[in-house]
Image (cartoon, rainbow, N blue to C red):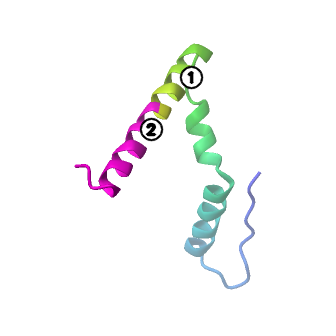
Amino acid sequence: MTKVTVREGETPDRAIKRFKRKVEQAGILKEVRKREHYLKPSVKAKLKARAAEARARKREKRLAMSQGGM
């Protein structure tokens, strides 16, 4: 659990900003969004494969650009 104590003389806005930064660094919001809806394992696998294909296409495109192919 992320916890932020307000320091002496610190404004609430500053404390909220520190809290948001800690939450972001801990990856809490990312985890919440991931768990918001259940995905069947087969759907997860399809999404993962699609992402891998997109990365491969991007890598190939970058390689072709660096070699002057396009």
Q: Which mark is residue 56?
A: 2
Kind of residue at badge 1: Lys
Q: Could you tell me which residue is drawn at 64 percent across and 50 percent down?
A: 27
Residue 11 appears at what percent x and percent y?
60, 78
Q: Residues within 10 Å of mark 1 (few under 14, many from 20)?
A: few
Q: State the SS at label 1.
A: helix
Kind of residue at badge 2: Ala
Residue 32 appears at what percent x and percent y?
61, 38
Give whichever of 10, 22 is nearer the camera: 22
| 2 or 1: tag closer to the N-terminus | 1
Q: Could you tell me which residue is drawn at 65 percent across and 81 percent down?
A: 10
Discs 2/1, front: 2
Find residue 36 and report its image quarter: top right
Left or right: residue 6 compared with residue 45: right
Q: Could you tell me which residue is drawn at 45 percent across and 40 percent down?
A: 55
Left or right: residue 64 compared with residue 28: left
Q: Could you tell me which residue is drawn at 54 percent across and 28 percent down?
A: 48
Residue 30 appears at what percent x and percent y?
58, 44
Q: State the SS at label 2.
A: helix
Give whichever of 65, 29 is nearer the camera: 65
Q: Residue furthest left?
A: 70
Whether residue 5 is in magenta: the answer is no
Give whichever of 62, 26 is nearer the camera: 62
Q: Residue furthest bottom?
A: 9
Disc 2 to disc 1: CB gap under 8 Å: no
Q: Is residue 22 above or below residue 35?
A: below
Residue 29 appears at what percent x and percent y?
59, 46
Q: Which mark is residue 44?
A: 1
Bounds of the magenta segment? 53-70
Q: Is residue 10 above or below residue 47?
A: below
Label 2 – label 1 distance at C-alpha: 18 Å
